[in-house]
Image (tube, rainbow, N blue to C red):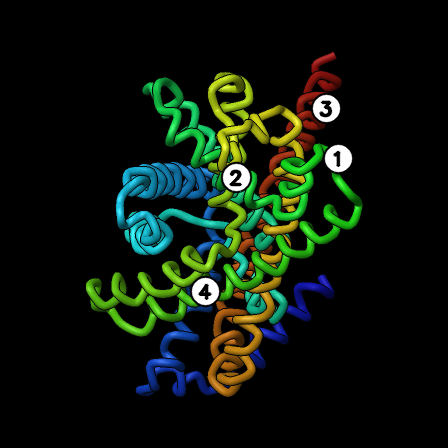
Amino acid sequence: MNKNNNIEEEIRSLKELDYGVLDAQHSFMVDGVLGGFKAAIHKLHYTFIKQILLGIMSGVIIGFGYVACIIAMVSLKGTGFEAFGTILLGFIFPGCIIMITFLGGGLFTSHVFSTIPVFKGCGSKRLYLKGIFGVLLGNFIGTFIFVAIFSGAGGLWDNVPFLNKVFDIAMHKLYLVNHDLQSNGSIKAVSILATIGIGICSGILCNIMVCSTLPLASTTKNAAAVILLMVFPIAYFAIGGFQHGPANSFFMWMLLFEAIFNHSQVAITNGSGEVLLRPEFYHFALFIALSTIPTLIGNWIGGALLLPGVLYFINKEYASILFKKIKLEYLEEKMGSFKEIADKQIKKIDKKLKQKKANIEARESENKSE
């Protein structure tokens, strides 16, 4: 009861505030930041199953994007345009994020943009954790589904140049550990620590760019402008080679499938054609421990704290008012849920009391008849 009273008191104080400033005309920056925070909070309100489904859809789209990028890069091999492969990757891959945005998919990397609003009371911690881990699980399931169907569609058969490129890119994401494996097969402790550190830092830089698409897309209602605004941040992180945890799960699953089905066909070779490395099951485990987990930590830091933190403090005058308005809506919804639960409990108690009364009356009538 005391908790309900505190919530009611907070609702009353929040209702007394003036939210008119949010309806005024603002600069592109202010509109973008406010819209980005609203979009991030809105994504958290889906059920856990819907979060997983949104993540699966995004994971499948990412799979399509990487296959297109890698086939395009492989097709340039041996031509005078081979050096443009990375640039080609940078301008094909943004199509994934554009499709996810317009189809309504979800990515762990953009969900974490809601961290500061949640800590400001715009939602519960449970809602936040359900949202980011639900969509992350979906991202991983989605890329697995894509890789499995891609394998069934013949993607692993008679496709050695493509598979070699995938293996090379995947192992490159292990940085110094990959160098150790190709050099002498023994992994040094310093290489493990350095690889983890690189993965975290690379993940930070990646998600600064990825999360910037939320405020950028919120600056305008023009679909063509949104598409154009999304191309550059995604192209920058893709060309720069920075690590995106959910997207990297495509390479994680491909490593597993190559180790199972293509161990003898796929290899990293040196200039003289000597085999340096072939896909093994332990590469899959190394990728999870030394690439996926550090990258996700970095993605969280970049997209949950650094970029939104800077944007919040620059636009604190408006963002604080927005957070209070969203908090008011959240508390009213919460209070409504409390009342609904209380009403159900009261009805349940009334039903039990009526039943008990009916039983007593039935016994009394039986005693009288005797």
Residue labelled with disc 4: 209
Q: Is residue 98 visible?
A: no
**Residue 370: assigned label:** none
Q: Is tag 2's residue or tag 1's residue first in the polypeptide sequence?
A: 2
Q: Position of residue 210 (x, y in %)?
A: 44, 60
Tell whether label 4 touches label 2 (CB within 8 Å).
no
Up the image or down, 308 lies above or below 107; here it is below
Q: Position of residue 29 (x, y in %)?
A: 38, 81
Q: Is residue 134 visible?
A: yes
Q: Nearer the viewer, mark 2 or mark 1?
A: 1
The amino acid at mark 2 is Ala
The amino acid at mark 1 is Ser
Q: Is tag 2's residue or tag 4's residue first in the polypeptide sequence?
A: 2
Looking at the image, which residue is at 52% across and 32% down? 268
**Residue 364: assigned label:** 3
Mark 2 → mark 4, Cα distance in angstroms: 21 Å
Looking at the image, which residue is at 39% across and 64% down? 233
Secondary structure, mark 2, is helix
Mark 2 → mark 1, Cα distance in angstroms: 19 Å
**Residue 186: assigned label:** 1
Residue labelled with disc 2: 170
Secondary structure, mark 3, is helix
Mark 2 → mark 3, Cα distance in angstroms: 80 Å
Secondary structure, mark 4, is helix
For label 3, the crowd category at 10 Å Cα-Cα, with few meaning under 14, some 14 to 19 and many 20 or more, is: few
Q: Is tag 2's residue or tag 3's residue first in the polypeptide sequence?
A: 2
The amino acid at mark 3 is Glu
